[in-house]
Image (tube, grey):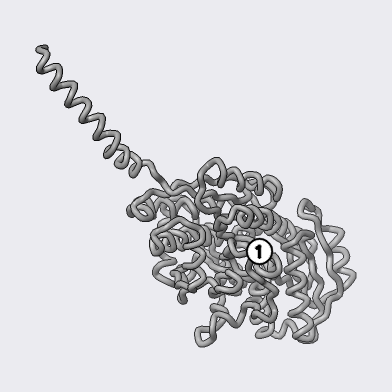
Amino acid sequence: MTSTNRRSVLKTGAAFAGAAAIGFPSIVSGQIDKIKIGHLTPLTGFLGALGAYAQLGLRQAEDEINKAGGVMGRQLDITSEDSVNPATAATKAQRMLEQDGATVLMGEISSASAVTIMQVAARNKRLFMQIGARSDSLRGKGCNKYTFHVDIPNTVMVNAVGKALMRDNLVKGKKFHTLTADYIFGHDLLKAAKTFFAANEATLTGDELIATDVTDFSPYLLKIRQAKPDVVCCNLAGNQVTILIKQYAEFGLPYPVVGFNLNTADAWAAGEGNLSGTWPTVWHHDLDTSASKKFVADFIAKHKKPPENHAWIEYISLKMMAQAMNETKSTDSEKLIAYFEKEAQFDVLKARKAYFRSWDHQLVQEAYPFTVKPKGKAKDQYDFLALGPAVPAANEPLEVINPTKEQNPCTLT
């Protein structure tokens, strides 16, 4: 090689290196600069089956968003882990923000773990979309500026079932015996239930607080037999509901069972012939809207089973987060909070759109009661639940089943 050619090559190489230093890294950066989200949900313990569905719904939304070009032209990169318990959930949430580069936090089903993640979010001034925990206190006196709540709270579940029970003359003058999960979620649910009973002239023959690791309900069922209530009310959570329902059927008690909390995965696990009564849900795969039907069809095609309500709620939660980021053109928590507080409308696959209330950050949406189809009417193991009409009715404001400002002691700070 001549010295001239060598000098030309060196100049060209230097120019290429300069271009790389200035231009090419921005291209590479654009390719690898993903939007990171930290996601926590229980995958073990009595809520583990629900968390498994939660992950499936989240991943379906992530795949759809990324295949459609991502958010602001960037791909989503979600780290999803088992929250395990409140202490572990807080530790993992902090690590996701500090070390993993998460822009926001999402997820959770356990109200106890949600409390600790909310505290991490507030300390770090980062948005937490709290998806599946239902305790009233989270969006009540425990609320904070950085947390938004997607699932219906306990009071709404009680109101949804209560309307159906009143229609069937199962409240006024009736005696209830309740079985309640002994942690923050159950305590809140019992409080809401007692408020409903008192307002509608029902009485309690007894209430049993039950630890979340109990699997033998026979001592409690014997108490029910002695109390002779008109109605038994289940305020349990997770797989404890399934275990109770099966043991109740085995005991052959004559009193109808209703509940203010039941997830469809737990109902399916109980099986046709064991479950009866009226229960609440936030969504069901039989919901008759075109958007819901498409989500269900896509989920079944991929997983060979219908989505449970935690799959749906994680799916629509990520879609709402993506909408907020696209509309604000930002992942900044303060800008996202401002967007949600404007009460932007979101398609949640129901007949009516939903929105977050600005003053307590609760998603206001329709809820539903469901009952059990007559024996022999189910097409398969997932088909024995009969979804009731939406609550509130189409001619009523969505707000009517939610606590009012006067009832909810939330002060966002």
Using the rendered image of the protein, determine whether residue 272 is visible from the camera's viewpoint. no
Quadrant of the snapshot with the N terminus: top left
Q: Where residue 218 sits in the image (x, y, percent)? A: 84, 58
Q: Residue at x 88, y 66 (%)?
A: 223
Using the rendered image of the protein, determine whether residue 60 is visible from the camera's viewpoint. yes
Towards the viewer: 18 or 183: 18
Q: Residue at x 82, y 79 (%)?
A: 175
Q: What is the number of callouts on the image?
A: 1
Q: Secondary structure at mark 1?
A: loop
Q: Counting other residues with Cα less than 10 Å from the Cα at mark 1, is it few (<14), some (14-19), or many (20 or more)?
A: some
Where residue 136 sits, quadrant-wise, is bottom right
Q: Residue at x 68, y 59 (%)?
A: 111
Q: Residue at x 14, y 16 (%)?
A: 6
Quadrant of the snapshot with the C terminus: bottom right
Decide: is 103 above or below 393.
above
Q: Where residue 167 sits in the image (x, y, percent)? A: 65, 85
Q: Quickly name the residue at label 1.
A: 273
Decide: is 229 above or below 396.
above
Towards the viewer: 76 or 96: 96
Towards the viewer: 68 or 224: 68
Q: Where residue 387 sits in the image (x, y, percent)? A: 55, 72
Q: Is residue 371 left or right of residue 30?
A: right
Q: Where residue 291 sits in the image (x, y, percent)? A: 40, 67
Tell which residue pokes out farthest to the top in this image. 1
Where residue 181 sits, quadrant-wise, is bottom right
- Name the kind of residue labelled 1 in the image: Gly
